[in-house]
Image: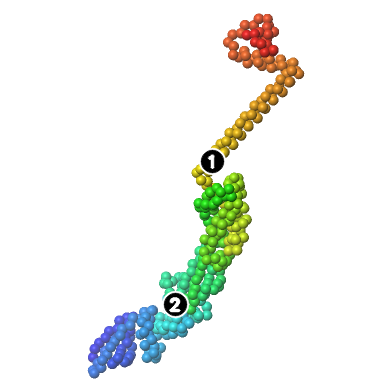
Amino acid sequence: MFTITIKENEKALVYKNEKFEKVLETGVHKLFHIFQNYRVERLQVTKEGITNSLQAQTLYKNYPELVEQYFNVVNLEENERAYIWIDGKFETLLECGTLHLYWKEFELKVEKVDVQSDCKVSEALAINLMQSKVTFAQTKKIVIRENQEGYLYVNHKFVEVLKAGRHFYYTDFYDVEVKAIETKIKELEITGQELLSSDKVTLRCNLTMHYKITDGRAYIEAVDQSKEYLYKQLQFAVREHLGALTIDEILSKQHTLSTEILEKFYTICKNVGVEVEGVYIKDIILPGEMREIFNQVIEASKRAEANNIQRREETAATRSLLNTAKLMNDNPALARLKELEALEKITQTIGTLNVYGGLDGVMNGLVDLKGNSRV
């Protein structure tokens, strides 16, 4: 006889001559082993049940009555998975075609799903996966952020557009892929683009394009690398347009050039699901020697413009004097007033003035209207 003690939250499987005989509950047990070979296997009574799948299959195959007495059996087909709740709390998601034994000491709830008929996890069950911190095998979590749209492809075929949020899919029988597209306005930069004008002047320009993806599926499926495609098409449009203009035309139209490029570029972008908000030329850069030549041209132009302005002003002043002379000739009173103005200016520069013969003497002594000065 030998004594074996089974602790709380334990059970023991007793094998006699390697043949299962009985289950020992919590407590102290005595076994007689005369001419018998006993083996005792202790099991923890936990909510996980029998974690060894081989052991669970052996017990279920060889001792079905024992299993039915002590365990809740979850036996899944090859296309089935099962959500497990123990004592009202979600615990795990079982994989396809597996066998699990759960102790009857715990309250068990099982919900089976056919993952071959539909790869999408229902919203009600997805809540359990979101709350769990465990990543389950053969499941895929997809997060679509705000200002994004997700384009779902199952077995390389488009299925639907996903909105912002978390989405779960079974991947046991399906290849699930999601391509997320930003729906907000994006920016595309082209810097240092070199080109040749129609009069063979080499120049560089920097451009910025603002665009928005309006048809994500077309944007994904139209070309292999959509952003690179837009970049190259914008390059081609700029080269084709600027290459047909002389350097003077380019510099004179640089503020309206963006609109012209946009009109030509819009149709190409629309075909790949893109709406162009605007194309802007930030700057046009000329070679060093060309900048020097243009500076000289501008300097000469401004100097000639200044000379023209000066001549126009001199002509205007002469014309004004001629008009004044005509008025004074026709109006003696006006001529007299001008004489008095001249006298006032002259007297401001004289420290002492002695007057003889009254006002006529002053006038005759200081001012000769015929141009002869007596002073």
Horizontal placement of 18 versus 261: left or right?
A: left
Q: Which mark is residue 293?
A: 1
136 shown above or below 345: below
Q: Secondary structure at mark 1?
A: helix
Which sits in the foreground, 314 or 78? 314
Q: Which mark is residue 328?
A: none
| Label 1: how many Cα within 10 Å (few below 14, some 14–19, many 20+) | few
Q: Percent position (x, y) of residue 184?
A: 55, 59
Which callout, 1 or 2, points to the residue nearer the camera?
1
Q: Residue type at mark 1?
A: Ile
Q: Report the residue at 58% width, 46% height from top.
A: 247
Residue matched to label 2: 93
Q: Secondary structure at mark 2?
A: strand
Q: Residue type at mark 2?
A: Leu
Q: Which quadrant of the figure contains the N terminus? A: bottom left
Q: Percent position (x, y) of residue 330?
A: 76, 18
Q: Report the residue at 44% width, 77% height from top.
A: 93
Q: CA distance from mark 1 to mark 2?
A: 77 Å
